[in-house]
Structure formats: structure tokens, C-alpha cells
Image: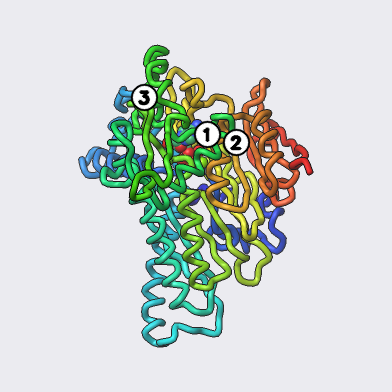
Amino acid sequence: MKAGVGKLLKKRFLYQFPGKSLKNPIRINKDIINVTGATMSVQYMCAGVRKVLAVIDSYYLSGRRSGDTISRANAPAALSVKEEPVSETNISQNVKARTADIQKSTKQDKKQNDNREGQSSEVKIIKQTRMIMGTFAEVSVYSKDEKTAGQAVEGALDEMERMDRIMSNYKQDSELSQMNKYAAKSPVHCQGELLDVIERSHYYSELSGGAFDITVSPLVTLWGFFQGKGHVPTDKEIEKVLPAVSYKNIVINKNTGTKKVNTVFFKNTQTQIDLGAIGKGYAVDKALEIVKKFGLENACINLGGNIYVLGTPHDKTAWKIGVQHPRNKGEILGYLELRDEATATSGDYERFFEMNGKRYSHIINPLTGRPVAGTIATTIVAPTGTEVDALSTSLFVLGHEKGLELIKKIPNVHAMIIYEGNDGKIIIEMTKGFADKFKKSPVKGEDNVKWHVVASHKQ
Ligand code: ADP
Ligand code: MG
């Protein structure tokens, strides 16, 4: 945490924030409340915790204060998904946020008892964090009515948990797991949100020419991402699973049979669905519906960096959402100023593994069967969570040329893509619409970064 705060204290960073000084620095969770970055997974957080426990165990509890016991040379030789992609800053931030929430809710409970109506003359921020879909979910609401706000926050988080129970392919009893188990044998009944998200996924597959494809699941498993243990398969192994990977293998039949039910059938016996690239954004939209039902107008819903902001924070003109630097841990490239919009980032820096000096990202090109190389990160701003989630992955796969061409055709969608240039420099390209909402921060190694703004969508 200290390192992160240190960076934020630097003068060059503070120039971005009028009124801030070294004595009155940027406050994480105050001046910038949310950051969009590639989704942090529980797996990696657990890896971090395991490391800390190992340090305590070998360094302190064993009585040996020798650093040798935890040296890199003694690390297990087996290849695993890189174990330390989560910045300390982020973890600490989140842990801190969580602690603050707990304290706040205790205070809140007391206040609610003191004041039965839960009304106060002051606008307050009510915030809660939970672990959902293998990452952090946080809902913040500004309101004078703490009681209603508290219920909305709980309701929104419950709704995201409900989506996880439907869409998880880690939970054996989820609707999706059941579908994956039986849909290649015979058509299975499918309704509600699962059907909705599968249909929307189909739309993004068509839109992206197959770059976005929820049937990528067998490849996610083959490359070891599902298990969290990276593995480079042979060409033969890839060729073997490729026929299973196509959204066209998913057959949706609506209102069939005497009971007029909807069914889903997989044409290929190996086809499996993975909603990792759309489920979080979809869940954010569902949580937003709950917040709106409570009549609230100023809120931020964040599920692992898939963020929707409703209205503005109290007394402010926009929500400031930091965009994580894909290479400098704990640093932000700048921040977006958003109102009634969503944003999400896909990146190669949270879930990946390295082998022989090569980085393999968890986003896979369904057409080649291989992890996408060259793209570093993509950030989308659009009207809904579903759009930003699906399009950030689509743009990541398509790359800057084809990807930005696609984005420019979609009204109200803005994008930034970061990729490796031929000269080894990092190129950051954004549409004009994105640039209008983005305030750049000075970053470390600025000379190695090229910024470009390209025209927004064609009228
Ligand atoms: P994150 O999970 O970091 O938010 P994304 O939203 O881009 O990132 O989703 C990536 C996840 O989606 C992967 O972990 C995998 O489960 C799945 N996936 C990988 N490649 C694709 C693809 N081309 N189309 C759809 N889903 C994908
Ligand atoms: Mg996505």
C-alpha cells in the first residue's frame, strides 16, 4: 500500500488534480473510488495470501530468519499461472475498503436503531464489498436515506450472487453447469437470464465475426486457465478441440413442443459454454436494475473492474474511474469521468502464464485456438455493463485495426486499446469519444509509450 500511496503523492501525479497538494494528496477510495482493470481472481489473491503465510511460516515461525528459505530458487519448478499479478496496492485498497465498510455498517446499524426512518439531512455514501464470481464486487450508493440505500446495496450484491449461481462453471449445480453436462445429449430447457445472456453472446459473436465466442471453454481448459495451471498444448491437441469451438454449435429453439418451452442444444459433443467474458457485465446490469428499483439515482456498481456509474457522486459532476496501467503495478494511466455509463477492461496482466519468456493471456482467439498475442489491454465505455464486458474481450481479440473499425461503427461506444508496437514501444490508441472522457496521468517510462487519438464512430 505504501508504494502505491507514494506514487500518488508525487507532484507530477497531483498536477492532474486541481486543489490537491503533497499535504492534501489524492485519496484512493475518495478522489478515485473505482479502478477498471483486468479482473483480479480469487485464485491469485489466494496465491498472494499463501505466499504471505509461507513467509511467516518459514521466516518467522520456524525460528530461522534466513531469506534463503523463501528464495526463488526454491520455488516449485512446475509451471503455474503467474502467481503475483495482483498489485499490493489493489489488495490493500480492497481489504481497507472492506474494513471500512464493516466499520461503517456497524455505525450504520446503530444509526438506524437511533433513527427509525433511517433518514438524515446529510447525503452519505453507503458502500459494501463482497467476493462474487471470483473477484471483488462493490456497490456504493449516495443517499440521505441510509436505510433504503443499505437495502439497495444488499439487494444489488444479492442479485450479482444470484447471477453467479446461474452462470458459474465452477459451481456444479449452476444452471450453466447443468446445461454443459446435458446439452450435447439432448435439448435442455433454458429460460430467464441464462437464455438471455446466451442470446446476447450470440449477437456479439456475429458482430465480432467470431472473435467473441462463449464456446471457447474447451480451449480455456486445454490451455490450463480453468484449472489455474498454465499448459502449452500441441498443435494436434488444439486441432482436436477446435471443431467444438463455435457459437454456431449452440442451437436455441424457442417455444418448442406442446409446453412451448425454450431449449438449448449443442451440436458438437465437446461443446461447452464459458460466460467469463460477459457474465460480470451482465450481472452489473442486473444489479443496476435493483438499485434503480429502490429509487436511487447516484450509485456505482463494480464487479471486478466491470463498472456502471449511475448519476454522479454527491456534489460532483462525474464519477472518476481510474484506468489501471497494464505494466506498472498500482499505477493508473489516467481516469475516466463518467455518468450513467459503463466501463470494463480486458487485459493480459492479471490472468496469464509465462513459458520460455512468452506471455500467454487468458483471452483466446476462438478461430486459431491460441491465446491472443500483441494486445495488452482494452477498455470500453458504453451504455451497459453487458456491452462493455463483451466488447472489451472482442476488441482484445480483434486487435487495434479491425477492433477499432468495429467500435467506430457502434454509436455511444468508446474504446482504448493498448498494444505492443513493432519497435517495442507500448502504443495506446483511443477513439475521440474516449479521449473526451479521459484525463491522462503522467506515467513512469513515458518515453516508451505512444499515445494516439483516432476519430470516433462514423455518423
Ligand atoms: P476478465 O475475465 O479479465 O474480465 P474478459 O472479460 O475479457 O476478462 O473475459 C476473459 C474470460 O472469458 C476468459 O477467462 C475466458 O473464460 C473467456 N474467454 C477467453 N477468450 C474468449 C473469447 N475469445 N470470447 C469469449 N470468451 C472468452
Ligand atoms: Mg469481457
Give the mark nearer the N terminus: 2 vs 1.
2
Ligand 1 within 8 Å of the CB at mark 1: yes
Amino acid type for the residue under numbered disc 2: Leu
Spatial separation of the CA atoms under disc 2 and disc 1: 9 Å
Residue bearing mark 1: 212
Identify which amino acid the numbered label 3 is placed on.
Leu
- For mark 3, does the 10 Å Cα neighbourhood hold few (<14), some (14 to 19), or many (20 or more) residues? some
The answer to whether 73 appears left or right of 94 in the picture is: left
Q: Looking at this view, is 279 or 103 the one in front?
A: 279
Crowding at mark 1 (Cα within 10 Å: few <14, some 14-19, many 20+): many
Q: Residue 222: give its label.
A: 3
Which residue is more in the foreground, 134 or 171? 171
User: Does the image show residue 1?
Assistant: yes
Q: On the rendered image, what quadrant is the C terminus found in? A: top right
Q: Which residue is mark 2?
A: 207
| Sequence-earlier tag: 1 or 3 | 1
Marks 3 and 2, how far apart at CA: 26 Å
